[in-house]
Amino acid sequence: MFQNRFFAVATLFAALLLLNGCGKKTDHKMSIEKKSIGKTELGEANLYTLTNANGMKVVITDIGGAVTEIWAKDSKGNLANVALGYKDHKTYVKNPNYFGCITGRYANRIADGNFTLEGEKYSLATNNGPNHLHGGDQGFDKHLWEGEGGTGEDSVFVKFTRTSPDGEEGYPGDLNVTVTYTLNNADELRVEYEATTSKPTVINLTNHTYFNLAGEGSETILDHELTLHADQFVATDDTNIPTSIADVNGTPMDFREAHVIGERIEDENEQLKFGLGYDHTWVIRQDSKDEEGLSLAATLVDPASGRVLEIRTDQPGIQFYSGNYLDDTTTGTSGKTYPLRSGLCLETQVFPDSPNHQGEEGWQSCVLLPGKTYRHVTVHKFSAR
């Protein structure tokens, strides 16, 4: 009888242990791993892999501070890489598509590569038709950054730093920049930018990750559903330079309610013709700020997998680019090539050509002065429904 009771108690105890184990939400150890890519023409390069307690992973290289992979779960708990990248990591040295990189000193375009600051005219490279794009010929994406990883209470991070010397790509001032990527156990990828300068300068930093929530290597993002929390967008000319701030109402630029991206992308609309699709900045509504002062900017959903990406930021604008220049010639991480519109970008920033619109109504300043600190925070939250 004693043996029977002992057996019953032992069985119950084992069952409780099993149930307790099954009830755990996490079974992964938070970690950060550094791995050498090898020598490049920029120097010895590395990959940093951030893993949270849920098994979500983000891989980042110190070449351009570029995000190379983001592994997120679908509605069934299956992980897939949802960021476009190069199969050969050394391609990030040239990075013709700007995959995943830090763009600066000035992300997006500056008209004719010229601006005037405090009475002095500055001339920059014109590397995008008649205009300056993403910091010039050797922007922040074309440099090796100094990386340092670490762990927090419920997060892992890698911090990248570099100094852009006075006159680099035509910009004034020594600019000391820090960009920190943090992955927490809420499946949020947080990107924090800070910079100081020795002279008055202009600055606009962002991240240029291409997303495909169906999984990297999937053929299209046209079936994704997008919501942009914006009543206005920045209209442009045929070289993508701003002409006005326009209402989205009654246009294919209206994403205040969720729309399938491919639904209106081929409409006979001048703005879509200029951008060869969507390649515009939306003016983020400021009525949904959280306790940190971040506003909800965008929600992206892949109905097939159930994956959801929500973006919050302290920036006034978000650039939605629908991958209009992907052309099936780039070999991606999985070995597949990337066809037209197989990835999209959602880049938080100030408006394009802001250096030439300082003081105008509706345009946030992009000027950084000595003694001041530039700050920019964007949070990418991944989930599934």
Image: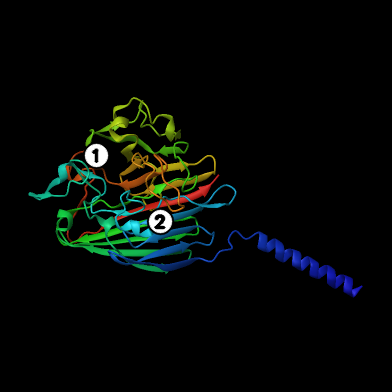
Which quarter of the figure has residue 362? top left
User: Which amino acid, mark 2?
Assistant: Thr
Residue 208 point in image, percent of width and height: 34, 50
Q: Which residue is mark 2?
A: 68
Q: Earlier in the sequence, mark 1 or mark 2?
A: 2
Labels 1 and 2 touching (C-beta < 8 A): no
Between 167 and 287, which is closer to the camera in this rendering?
167
Q: Which residue is mark 1?
A: 362
**Which dot, 1 or 2, sits closer to the camera?**
2
Residue 5 to residue 368: above or below = below
Residue 214 point in image, percent of width and height: 50, 44
Mark carried by residue 244: none
* Residue furthest left as drawn: 119
Between 9 and 74, which is closer to the camera in this rendering?
74
Q: Is residue 151 visible?
A: no
- Left or right, 232 with respect to 382, comes to left
At horizontal 47% and vertical 38% (from top left) the residue drawn is: 224
User: Which amino acid, mark 1?
Assistant: Gly
